[in-house]
Each structure stands twice: as structure tokens, then as C-alpha cells.
Image (cartoon, coloured by chain):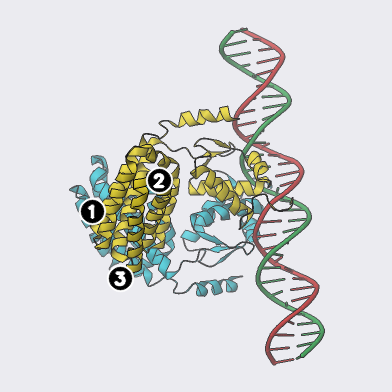
Chain colours: A yellow, B cyan, C red, D green
Amino acid sequence: MSGKRGLVRSGTTVDQMVRAIADRIVTGYLRPGERLDEGSLAARFDVSRTPVREALGQLSAMGLVERRPNRGAIVAVITQEHLASMFESMAELEAICARFSAERMTSAERRSLELEHQGSARLVQLGAEEDYEYFNTDFHSRLYRGAHSTHIHDLTVTTRSRLAPFRRAQFMLPGRLAKSWQEHDVIVTAIMRGDGAAAGKAARDHVSIVSEASAVFAVPNPMESRLSLSVRR
Amino acid sequence: MSGKRGLVRSGTTVDQMVRAIADRIVTGYLRPGERLDEGSLAARFDVSRTPVREALGQLSAMGLVERRPNRGAIVAVITQEHLASMFESMAELEAICARFSAERMTSAERRSLELEHQGSARLVQLGAEEDYEYFNTDFHSRLYRGAHSTHIHDLTVTTRSRLAPFRRAQFMLPGRLAKSWQEHDVIVTAIMRGDGAAAGKAARDHVSIVSEASAVFAVPNPMESRLSLSVRR
DNA sequence: CCGAAGGCAAGTGCATGCACTTTTTGACTG
DNA sequence: CAGTCAAAAAGTGCATGCACTTGCCTTCGG
């Protein structure tokens, strides 16, 4: 090995590669359809191709990249249809989490949720988009954890991360912050009074609205992004 | 390479390994906690360690195996708690599929579902456990597909496969076949009349019952299965 | 007889190399 | 000048090798 790795964090090299690549995909730095060349990635991270290959395999198992035998890997291309399906699933998963949260959250969790939610009102007034986005992620995480079910939690988190590249679009819409807060408010209120059905419905509606906002920005046709990559080279 | 592989089916070597190992885990041939030695697996399938490692990585990403850095891989050990969480998720996912099926199945799908379901009554009368199990898998697959949502379908299928090792126990209970058929019947009836809510509830209840039946057979403590492996060597 | 230290065997983690497949390129032909 | 074909280039798939880590077992001091 050529000494210590460049950007070491923790875990094995493969784990680091998985995180590094997943990060770049989820944040949109690597675009759907973009070619993932083993050699280049290996050079880029200063490792051999072996761990890169393993990382790509795992990412492919997670659905973040697509692997065509003998023809390399690309960042997973998501069709309009599949995207809709993922948002739909997300809405259902959030609904489940909200419902369970309403039924199962400890009083400490409830207090904390409400407190944070009320605090976020300030961010809306200030129009602090970025801070609100940060809070928003936290808010949803609380719901996932509040369901007190590790597997539901995992399914939801994974689905959410796969949707991440498509969510960024939503905040470009005017008045989005206030709207989002209102929707959160309905969810929180339902949870506070232990009304699972209402919390579930509110959460589902919340996601559905985000979904509609994002759909507009989705890639209409896989071909497009596939073409764009040749430019990059 | 040492000529053609022993048990070739299709795809790359790694894919075959993933399927082969996943199969052995899901069917219970490999037991939770059992050691997965790279060298032995490589010898067993007559490949080098490289594809075995990749396969284990992917299986770990899928949650079927657990990898401890520098300390090898074992078949994922599922705690009582996590198992409960998975059954719970499964119930919710099945509920979603049933609800969507009730709302979205084409008339051809409905007809076919009902036909197959009615046909399975014979298997119950005959007490054909194995055949019924085969039909049962098919029945549920129809519901998953009937939801017309690829992502929900995927989530459900993966969760189901992870639960597979724990489901085998259910048919040991007497009168299980008739009970299962009755439960299916409620689901089918609700789907036929397009009643999503009823179909969802029925499907959820159906899984919950299986869950209770299986829980009894689950490993009470991870330690136990971890110990059993040393015997096998 | 118990426990710590050290060495050994087994096994993992990654780099490298070679065979094979796909893609590209460029000369040649109709 | 477009189309075809072959050879080179690029890139993937797997095997092999070596360094390192872990767990075990021996050995020695207490």
C-alpha cells in the first residue's frame, strides 16, 4: 500500500469508498447516467481497483449504481415512472412512521419534537432556506426513530437517501418554507394527541406535495443523461 | 481461470455467488451466526477469493450477512427484537400492496388472482403442505405486483426474503393451511370489490398471525447460533 | 495452578497482473 | 463520402500474492 490513504475517516477502505461515492451521488455531484470508471475512481482515491470494484458492487446492491456486465458502472438512472414509484413508497413509509410515532413516542420524544418544530418557525420567518433544510432533515429523522422499529427505520432512511438527489429541487418553489412548516404542524399536532391515523395521513400528504414539486425537475428520459457524460470526458 | 464453473447458471461469477449464498441462507441451509469463510467458499465453488469477497460485500449490503472488519463474515444474526420489527414492517408492506392491489389491479389480474385462489382450496383439502406453500408464495407475489409500484414491490420482496428463514416454521402448526386460506379469502374478497382499506387490514392481520407463529421458533439469543458453528467445522 | 507474554497458524484486506470483452479508430472499399 | 471491417485501445473480470490482523496455543513467571 502507498502509505495512509488521502481522505481517511474510519472503517475499511471499501467502506470509505462506498460512503465517498454514495455521498457524491446523493448530493448530486455525480449525476444519474454518469460513467463510473474503476480505474479513474481508483486513481482519484489512491487505491487499487479491487476495493473500488467491491464498493461499486455494494452500491449496486443498494440501487445507487447500475452495473452492466463487462460494460462498466453508471450512476443509477431513474425513470420518471420509477421515481414516481419511489416517492409513492416514501409517502407510505413516512405515513407509517408518523402513525407509529403517534402511537409509540415516549413523552420525552414528543416534547423534543414539538420544541424543535416550534423553534423552526423562526427559520421560516427569516427565510433561512439552508437552515430550514437542515432542520427539516432532522424533523423527519425524529419521525423515523419515533416509530421504534429498526427495520421500518432502515427502509425509510434508504428510500429517502435514494430520493435525495431529486428533493433538492423543491425549495426553489416560492413560499415553500411556510407551506412545509404548516404541513409539519399538522403532523406534530396529530402526534401530540396520539392520533395515528391523522398523523399518517398528514405525513403522506406532506410527501406527496414534495413529490409533485420534484417531479417537474426529474430527468424525463434516461437517454439525456446518458448522453451528457460523453461531454464530461 | 480453471475452465467453466461447476454450477453455472448465468451472469457474472459474482452474481452467481450472490445468488448461491443468498439461496443457502434463505433456505436455512446456512444458519444465522454461521461462519462464512472466504477460502472455503472459494474452494467450494471453485473460484478465487476475489468474487467471493465481492459477493459477501453485496450480501452484507443487503443485510443477509454481517461483516466484521478483519474478522470474517457470518450469516446475519437477527435479534428477537429486530425480527419483530421486520415482521411488523412486512405486515405494513403487505397491507400497502393489498390496498394498492384493490385500487389498481387490472381486471385480468383480479380474475387470475381469484382463479388461483379458488384453485388452492383443493390443496387445503388434500393437506398438500408443500404445494400450498408454493402457491402461497405465488399468491403474495401477485399482490406485490398488483400494487403497480416497482419500488414498493422491491421493498416487499427484499423484506420477505430476509424473513424467509423464519417463515418455514409456520406450517408446523396444525390447521395452518385452512386458516391461511381463510385469511387469503378475506383479502381476495376485499380486492375484488375494490375495498383498499379492508384489503390492507386483512393483509396486515394475515402477516401478523404468521409473525406470531414464527416468533416462537426464532433464536432467543444470538449467542446460541454463534456457538453452534464450531461444531460444524 | 493461574495468568501474562510471545509466537504461530488461519484468515482477511488490498495490490497487481493477465485474459477477455467492449469500444474506438482508421484504413479501405464500393 | 458513407459504410465496413479489423486492429488497437480502453476497460472489466478474476486469479494470485503478499502484508497485516486476529485468535489460539504454547511457554514461562509468579
* Label ID, residue B174: 3
The mark closer to the camera, 1 or 3, is 1
Residue at the image point whose x is 35% and y is 68% from the top: A108
Q: Amino acid at mark 1?
A: Ala
State left or right for residue A100 relative to residue C16. Answer: left
Label 3: state its secondary structure. Answer: loop
Q: Amino acid at mark 2?
A: Ala
Percent from the top left, x then y, of residue B143? 30, 50
Residue under circle 2? A128
Q: Which of the pair A113/A206 is nearer the observer?
A: A113
State left or right for residue B71 relative to residue B146. Answer: right
Q: Which of the pair B105/A203 is nearer the observer?
A: A203
Q: Residue B123: name its quadrant.
A: bottom left
Q: Amino acid at mark 3?
A: Pro
- Asked whether the viewer can see residue B47, the reply is no
Residue at the image point whose x is 65% and y is 42% from the top: A44
Percent from the top left, x then y, of residue B1? 69, 46
Task: Compute the Cα span from label 2 to label 1.
Answer: 44 Å
Report the chain holding disc 1: B
Asked if badge 2 and badge 3 are on a common chain, one would say no
Task: Compute the Cα span from label 1 to label 3.
Answer: 26 Å
* Label ID, residue B199: 1
Q: Residue B179: name its quadrant.
A: bottom left
